[in-house]
Image (cartoon, rainbow, N blue to C red):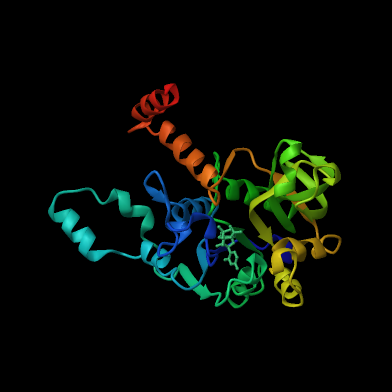
């Protein structure tokens, strides 16, 4: 059965303009902004690897090549560090296995759905993961591992969701929930940014998906949606009813690093948890809060 084919590929749409972070993102991709000392894209790739995913497909655009450089071997840096007796461990996770990072270009940022569609030839005819690197998911196991485990149970299509206070739902995509079984909720429909009183639930879509390859055909025939962009949510909504669709409630924390406040929150939260600097950062934060 095609729905239980293993998840071997993940698509990372990284071609967005990152306008909320200008001027920082004028020359540096948003996905390379660091939370403490690791760029956002590194957290996402590590999360995919933990879930057993082997092939990382980056949908890039103009000015985004530094993302690929990040996973290259930096000979000069490594030999200089070795000569100086410095450990190279810190670079370990940035060394990709040859051939496991593939890039495709999205020439014009026409929306998330369009970015995913740009990867269709590489995805081929197998189910695949989508990871939005600006949503930092922190959990044990990681979010994608939790989703792959759920996929191995139910197959089909899965999206990761989080429960938020009701008054916040109108900033997000929201699911219309059906039967609930543990962390799994059947998805009956998807609504993008509903008014609070019309929201079918408080379960919002977060940036992790496992989708069947049929979504590519759905995207192919789809016009522009909200904001004049080709929306992934619209394509997924059209698949509901034709294919199994579940939401996985993520057991962990999500930081919206595409927004400035979320980025600062993630930086502070992760810094406070670090053994090498947590106490120092706590003292600094307490001092600043007393002012
Ligand atoms: P966002 O909505 O966060 O857009 O995209 P953005 O351009 O990155 O940031 P702002 O809103 O201008 O500050 C969500 C994800 O979809 C990707 C982005 O790179 C991000 O990972 N994306 C979005 C594309 O790859 N292509 C697009 O056309 C749009």
Total marks shown come to 0
- Report the quarter where the C terminus lies: top left
Q: Position of residue 47 (x, y in %)?
A: 51, 50
Q: Position of residue 27 (x, y in %)?
A: 40, 65
41, 45: nearer the viewer: 41
Res 212 visible: no
On screen, residue 63 above or below 174: below
Residue at the spot 41% in from the left edge and 70% down from the top edge? 65
Q: Position of residue 139 (x, y in %)?
A: 55, 40
Residue at the spot 13% in from the left edge and 51% down from the top edge? 84
Q: Would residue 173 be found to the left or right of residue 63 on screen? A: right
- Report the quarter where the N terminus lies: bottom right
Res 243 visible: yes
Q: Quadrant of residue 69?
A: bottom left
Work out which residue is located at the far top of the displayed protein and give it. Answer: 290
Q: Quadrant of residue 163?
A: top right
On screen, residue 205 above or below 18: above
Work out which residue is located at the far front of the displayed protein and give it. Answer: 291
Q: Position of residue 110 (x, y in %)?
A: 63, 72
Residue at the spot 56% in from the left edge and 74% down from the top edge? 106
Residue at the spot 48% in from the left edge and 41% down from the top edge? 264
Q: Quadrant of ligand 1?
A: bottom right
Work out which residue is located at the far left of the displayed protein and give it. Answer: 83
249, 197: nearer the viewer: 197
């Amino acid at each position: 059965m095609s729905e239980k084919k293993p998840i071997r590929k993940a698509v990372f749409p990284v071609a967005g303009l990152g306008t909320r972070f200008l001027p920082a993102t004028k020359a540096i991709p948003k996905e390379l902004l660091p939370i403490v000392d690791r760029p956002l894209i590194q957290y996402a790739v590590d999360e995919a690897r933990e879930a057993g995913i082997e092939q990382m497909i980056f949908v890039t655009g103009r000015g985004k090549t530094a993302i690929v450089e990040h996973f290259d071997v930096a000979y000069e840096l490594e030999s200089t560090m070795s000569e100086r007796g410095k450990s190279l461990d810190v670079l370990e996770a940035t060394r990709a296995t040859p051939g496991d990072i593939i890039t495709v270009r999205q020439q014009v940022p026409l929306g998330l759905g369009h970015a995913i569609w740009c990867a269709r030839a590489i995805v081929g005819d197998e189910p695949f993961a989508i990871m939005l690197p600006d949503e930092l998911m922190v959990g044990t196991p990681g979010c994608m591992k939790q989703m792959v485990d759920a996929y191995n149970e139910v197959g089909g299509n899965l999206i990761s969701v989080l429960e938020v206070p009701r008054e916040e739902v109108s900033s997000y995509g929201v699911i219309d929930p059906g039967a609930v079984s543990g962390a799994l909720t059947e998805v009956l429909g998807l609504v993008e940014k509903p008014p609070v009183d019309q929201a079918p639930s408080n379960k919002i879509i977060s940036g992790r998906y496992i989708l069947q390859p049929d979504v590519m055909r759905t995207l192919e025939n789809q016009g522009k949606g909200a904001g004049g962009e080709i929306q992934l949510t619209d394509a997924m909504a059209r698949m509901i009813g034709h294919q199994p669709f579940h939401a996985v409630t993520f057991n962990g924390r999500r930081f919206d690093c595409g927004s400035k406040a979320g980025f600062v929150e993630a930086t502070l939260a992760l810094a406070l948890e670090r053994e090498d600097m947590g106490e120092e950062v706590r003292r600094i934060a307490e001092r600043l809060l007393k002012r």
